[in-house]
């Protein structure tokens, strides 16, 4: 398969990826965790709260994001991809 | 490439397995190792020769035997993985010098399933990652193996998993910002994935 990441796109991507490797306190993650669902602040080494359901975890993440303002809530899938990402002002 | 930091990855390369291959690659990179994958090499070369070259150049290796059993009736099981495991074990047994120091981790979904098909390696300890929470489990099994072969001070498996999830989101969001669609992201090659994971880990600041 042809390399999809070429030229300008590649160098832009590397720069922005390096920047995003720095932790960003304006991101909250909702993550499948040991059969349950956890809410985690970016860069933290442990879960902020753990819930039995994804809905409960997402509700808390949205609430926290609204309180903080300008915070992105990233919801992860069990397959290791992002299901959704939305910013709360 | 330095023998002592190379890890040969012997696992399925289909899209279904990518959800497990990516965390395997990330865990190796995060722990300071360089993943060696046969598909990264020149496609004009004879595949078996590439594989033997990678095995000889890698002190460590990770073998996943989970595809030894077909999933449905009529489907042919895959024997590349046990074959390459045999080559790796043979290299350690017959090889000289540094090859005697090779170390491998054998993974499967169930711990003792392999014995029915591959009884010659009965007695070898196989790490099983089960059928649930596989991404977390596979990271945990590799991390635990690293404590034995690299040294006891390794990041916790929880930390590795959480770091992995942050890398996944950073990479996906940055790719989407550059108008990559879902298929483009899904079809990133292993060499691209290794390249970006290495860049990200190097610049991680926690």
Image: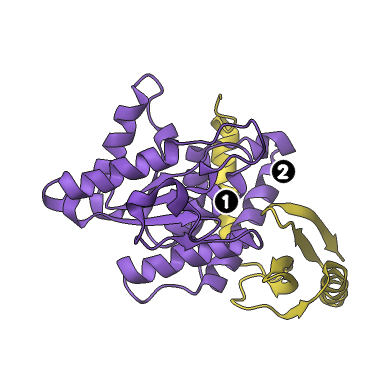
The chain letter for the residue carrying disc 1 is: B
Occupied quadrant, residue B183? top right
Say left or right for B204 vs A56.
left
The residue under the point 32% across, 31% down is B50
- Taking depth in this image into account, of A24 and A63 the one nearest to the observer is A63
Q: x and y percent of residue A26 in the render?
A: 73, 69
What separation in Å lies between label 1 and label 2 (alpha carbons)? 22 Å
Say left or right for B150 vs B133.
left
Q: Nearer the viewer, mark 1 or mark 2?
A: 1
The chain letter for the residue carrying disc 2 is: B
Q: x and y percent of residue B73 in the render?
A: 66, 35
- Taking depth in this image into account, of B124 and B57 the one nearest to the observer is B124
The residue under the point 43% across, 53% down is B115
Say left or right for B63 vs B129.
left
**Which of disc 2 and disc 1 is earlier in sequence?**
1
Q: Which mark is residue B176?
A: 2
Q: Which chain is purple?
A: B
**Image vertical order of residue B150 relative to residue B29, above or below:** below
Can you name the residue that lies furthest to the left here? B97
Q: Secondary structure at mark 1?
A: helix
Q: Which residue is mark 1?
A: B20
């Amino acid at each position: 398969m042809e390399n999809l990441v070429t030229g300008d796109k590649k160098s832009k991507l590397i720069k922005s990826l390096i920047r995003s490797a720095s932790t960003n306190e304006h991101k909250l993650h909702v993550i499948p965790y040991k059969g349950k669902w956890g809410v985690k602040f970016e860069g933290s080494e442990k879960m902020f709260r753990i819930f039995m359901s994804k809905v409960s975890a997402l509700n808390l993440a949205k609430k926290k994001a609204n309180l903080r303002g300008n915070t992105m809530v990233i919801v992860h899938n069990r397959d290791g991809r992002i299901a959704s990402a939305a910013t709360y002002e | 490439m330095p023998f002592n930091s190379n890890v040969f990855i012997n696992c399925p390369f289909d899209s279904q397995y990518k959800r497990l291959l990516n965390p395997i690659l990330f865990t190796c990179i995060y722990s300071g190792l360089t993943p060696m994958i046969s598909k990264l090499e020149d496609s004009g070369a004879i595949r078996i020769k590439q594989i033997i070259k990678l095995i000889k150049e890698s002190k460590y290796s990770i073998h996943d035997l989970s595809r030894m059993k077909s999933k449905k009736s009529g489907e042919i099981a895959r024997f590349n993985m046990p074959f390459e495991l045999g080559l790796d074990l043979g290299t350690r047994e017959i090889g000289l010098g540094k090859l005697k120091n090779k170390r491998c981790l054998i993974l499967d979904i169930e711990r003792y399933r392999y014995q029915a098909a591959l009884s010659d390696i009965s007695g070898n300890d196989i790490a099983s990652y089960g059928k649930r929470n596989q991404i977390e489990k596979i990271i945990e099994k590799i991390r635990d193996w690293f404590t034995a072969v690299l040294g006891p001070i390794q990041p916790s498996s929880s930390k590795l998993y959480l770091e992995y999830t942050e890398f996944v989101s950073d990479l996906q969001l940055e790719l989407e910002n550059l108008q990559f669609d879902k298929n483009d992201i899904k079809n990133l090659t292993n060499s691209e994935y290794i390249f970006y994971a290495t860049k990200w880990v190097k610049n991680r600041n926690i």
